[in-house]
Amino acid sequence: MDEHFPLEKTDRLVFDSYPVPVTIEQDNLNISLKKQDGLLAYYRECGREVVEKSLLADRGQLYLNPVEPINKPKELTPFFLVMLEQPLAVRPRENREITVTFPVEIASIFVGQGKSYTVLDVFSLVSPKYTLYGSPATGMLCRYWQSRVYAEPPETTFYLQGTMQVRVQNTTARWAEVTRMVFNAQDMKLFYDRHQVSMKGYMKILSDTTAETGFIEEHPKPAESIAKKSMDLFTSGKLLMAGPKMLMEEGI
Amino acid sequence: MIFSQVVYGDVTVLNILVAVLIFLVGIILSKLLALNLRRSFREKLSREHLELIVKVVSYTVIIIAVLLVLPQVGVEPSGLMVAGGIAGIAIGFASQGIVGNLLAGLFLIFERPIKIGDIVNIGDVIGFVEDIRVISTTIRTFEGLYVRIPNEKVFNDSITNFVANQARRFEYTVGIRYQDSAEKAIEIINSVLDQHPLVLVNPPAHAFVDELGDDGVNIIIRIWAPSTEWYGVKTELLWKIKCALEEGGIEIPFPQRVLWFAEKPPQEGN
């Protein structure tokens, strides 16, 4: 352990770039990237999970960047379901913004000379959970998260939870009850700063049981402070087989 | 000149050479396209979609090459329409098995009861679908064996696709002693299941007392997991449940029998 974490300056976790060599400690997370035997050695320990890699590079920077929360424990699905702690009744023709939270996953990205980069690792300090949206025969596998509904973005621990401002629009002439929101994370637009992660989405209620959801590429509130757009880890390597919009047909 | 020498009808040696050249170029082009498609889209498309695209592109190029070759060898493609009917009957009788497999293969490719990468049971073969070709389907069994099954057999046999649906259920039976609390055991089991990321929230896992058995109380645990991951989850969870129960003071009972003696057994030393 000492080999990886010598008694030198240790950084706390923020979403930013770190010049190499670097050691970061936060809760049960330890990250280091330093020169070892002529190579750069990356080490990350988070709970029981340990990742070690050697890099054939001399200098560069380590970026810790929030990414779509659908990578842990492995990439299984592009869909992300937010289960509301209490059902949300939406009056007819309502068009209003609410906020929910979402789990944060973080990518360790090494940027070498000439701005070339490689994703070393993705980790999360939040335990992931999965669920099925719909029946076992026709349903979709989704990353699961439970959240309260907030009128304004709440204070969160930035490395655990981000905030998603969702414009809920009830296009019907009747009250609608929303219990969950399913998004296609392939098109997630994450914005972040050193101590916060946020994004904007929408949910258009089409009937009692169907809704359309998606993401909006706009700076979330407060726009001036959440300046950086996160790297789209999921879409960077894959073609969008389905459109970015998501049609919730198995209930809302 | 040797190139203008007539081989048969109006077909010269040059025509034959051009035909061979076109056919070779067609095959090489189809191979190159397949290779490039695989290289370019390996990371971006699922293997099943990629192989379907590769097959469609390869066969299209080869069919175009054959259509270009035919006039060179003195066969007009329009003439094939007439000859095709008669030839088809003759070929059909001569190669019933191959044609049957071919048709079954086409149905399999378009109906898609199985896809490349799926875990299936066809007849008595269980394994991963490695490839679906026009004549046969190849399966890699869990033991690593390569099994080629003619498509006609695949089409006619019953197929069990273990991953066609998104989620799959499995269950354990765990026995506890009569003196242990079943409520507490179920609580511990549920907490283990809650901690596992791939035990689905919905459909929910279910643990309940199923039987008051000879040796203990049997609790059944039903768990839903993603179809592609269920085996890993199944092999991982049972031991975790056992350890958690023991940590909570609940033990798995050994087989036991209560013996009643009609008379008091003789004391030691008597």
Image: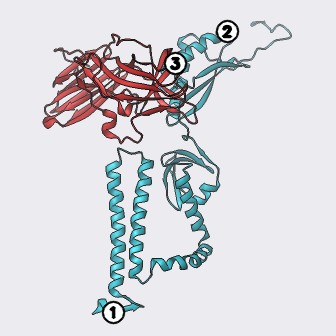
Chain colours: A red, B cyan
At a point 32% along the width and 85% down the height, the residue shown is B14
Q: Amino acid at mark 2?
A: Gln
Disc 2 marks which residue?
A: B179
Q: Which residue is mark 3?
A: B192
Label located before the other in sequence (2 or 3): 2
User: Does dot 2 land on a helix, a strand or a loop?
Assistant: loop
On screen, residue B159 above or below A225? below
Look at the picture and state if B138 lies above or below A252: below
Quarter containing the N terminus of chain A: top left
- Mark 1 to mark 3 CA distance (whole Å): 83 Å
Quickly name the residue at label 1: B5
Q: Secondary structure at mark 1?
A: loop
Residue A56, located in which quarter of the rendered image?
top left
Distance (Cα) linking label 2 and label 3: 22 Å
Q: Quadrant of residue B82?
A: bottom right
Q: Which of the marked residues, 1 or 2, is nearer the chain's N terminus?
A: 1
Q: CA distance from mark 1 to mark 2?
A: 100 Å
Q: Are marks 2 and 3 in one subunit? A: yes
Residue A39 in sight from this viewpoint = yes
Instruction: Give the amino acid at mark 3.
Output: Val
